[in-house]
Amino acid sequence: MYDKEKFKGILPALLTPFDKSDKVSKKSVEKLIRYNLAKGVDGFYVGGSTGEGLLLTKEERETLFEYAAEANNGKSTMIAHVGTVCTEHAIEMAKNAEKLGYDAISAVAPYYYAFTPEQRKQYYYDIADATSLPMIVYNFPAANGFNLDKGTAEEMFAHTDKFIGIKHTTSDLFALEQFKTMKAKPIVYNGFDEMLIGGLAMGADGGIGSTYNFMAEKFITIYRSFVNNDVKTACATQYEVNEIIAQLIKYGVFASEKYILECLGIEMGDCRRPFLPLSEEGKKAMREIAKQFQKAE
């Protein structure tokens, strides 16, 4: 029913730029998407963890969906992350994404409350049943304590063929490989940037990543080199990006990414509280990293 091929490849988990009034910046969303399209990315994952989606109001998330869809203008695959703790709000955002022409929706499992396995599955069924869009399950156990296993995934994917993929944000590559053995043959994305090559080796169909926002070309090289059996180049490039990622982790990943993009000519603003602004030491380190990358037009 759904063309899974269009979902393969390298998709930045889009950062959310804010203007000086702390509103989602349409101008910067457009510039960030153009910047990455020019590098050859295969699509965008909008409103997820990197995009500070859970620090935005529902209305702000829908505004972000609108700006991103307009900027992309059908040029690449668009996935809207609609996950939240309230099923009703997730459904409303999913319907909005469908109206805007998104290719798929995605959702992290509901969090904070100790939901039962049945409640979590029903949450996904309710969202999936609300639109005609395919669903990509966002598996991020470190963030919400729910770790999707193959048995649960098999059950969910048997509920409706709208379940087409899994965004696997965990270092458990055995679980990733097991998802690829499922009868439904889901698309599986590697979620941790620093181990893309490991995910690809275990069967991932591509990656959705945070640092792709400013160095997508590196991850495209990893992906294409691996697919073309040039493992040496893929490994060497993974080692290069991991040196950069180690610096981002030291100072704060999202704030560091935003500052690098500021240095490259895209106004990003600060992250939403309770995230804190990047330190002066961090800014100095990120300015050095930014010198390695081409400025935005």
Image (cartoon, rainbow, N blue to C red):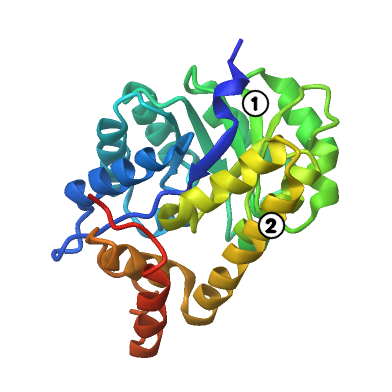
The residue indicated by pointer 2 is 141
Residue 208 is left or right of residue 166, and the answer is left
Residue closest to the eye, 148 or 184:
184
Looking at the rendered image, the quarter that the N terminus falls into is top right
Residue 39 is left or right of residue 2, and the answer is left
The residue indicated by pointer 1 is 164
Tell me the residue at 37%/38% (across/down). 37
- Residue density around tag 1, few if under 14, some if 14–19, many if 20 or more, within 10 Å: many
Tell me the residue at 53%/81% (across/down). 250
- On screen, residue 109 above or below 289: above
Residue 135 is left or right of residue 119, and the answer is left
Residue closest to the eye, 121 or 234:
234
- Residue density around tag 2, few if under 14, some if 14–19, many if 20 or more, within 10 Å: some
Q: Quadrant of residue 65?
A: top left
Residue 85 appears in view: no
Specify the amino acid type for callout 1.
Ile
Residue closest to the eye, 275 or 13:
13
**Residue furthest to the left:** 21
Location of residue 117 in the rendering, given as x and y in whole percent from the top left corner? 74, 44
> Disc 1 versus disc 2: distance between alpha carbons?
20 Å
Disc 1 or 2, which lies upstream in sequence? 2
Location of residue 126 in the rendering, given as x and y in whole percent from the top left corner? 56, 29
Tell me the residue at 29%/58% (across/down). 295
Residue 172 is left or right of residue 64, and the answer is right
Tell me the residue at 50%/21% (across/down). 133
Asked if labels 2 and 1 touch by Cβ distance under 8 angstroms, the answer is no
Q: Quadrant of residue 258?
A: bottom left
Identify the element where label 1 is drawn. strand
Residue closest to the eye, 202 or 239:
239
Specify the amino acid type for callout 2.
Pro
Residue 281 appears in view: yes
